[in-house]
Amino acid sequence: MSPVPHPTPSARGRRRARAAAAAAACALVLGL
């Protein structure tokens, strides 16, 4: 992630964070 914060809406960042969490959960399930 770049150190400079991009002018993006909080909603987009929240969606991106949720997508990252979903991907991590999927990877965890696949790992198990």
Image (cartoon, grey):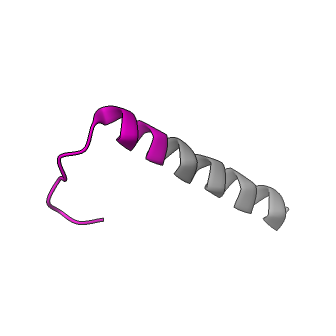
Up the image or down, 1 lies above or below 21; here it is below
Q: Residue at x 82, y 63 (%)?
A: 30
Give the side of residue 19 with respect to residue 22, left or right: left
Can you name the residue that lies furthest to the right here?
32
Foreground residue among 8 and 17: 8
Q: Is residue 22 magenta?
A: no
Residue at image location 25% in from the left, 44% down from the top: 8
Q: Position of residue 26 (x, y in %)?
A: 73, 55
Q: Is residue 32 left or right of residue 26?
A: right
- In this rendering, is residue 14 above or below 5? above
Residue 31, percent across and down? Answer: 80, 66
**Left or right side of 11 for 18:** right
Furthest residue toward left: 4
Does the magenta segment cover residue 13?
yes
Question: Which image quarter holds the N terminus?
Answer: bottom left
Image point 72% across, 62% down: which residue? 27
22 shown above or below 11: below
Q: Which residues are magenta?
A: 1-16
Q: Residue at left 85%, top 61%?
A: 32
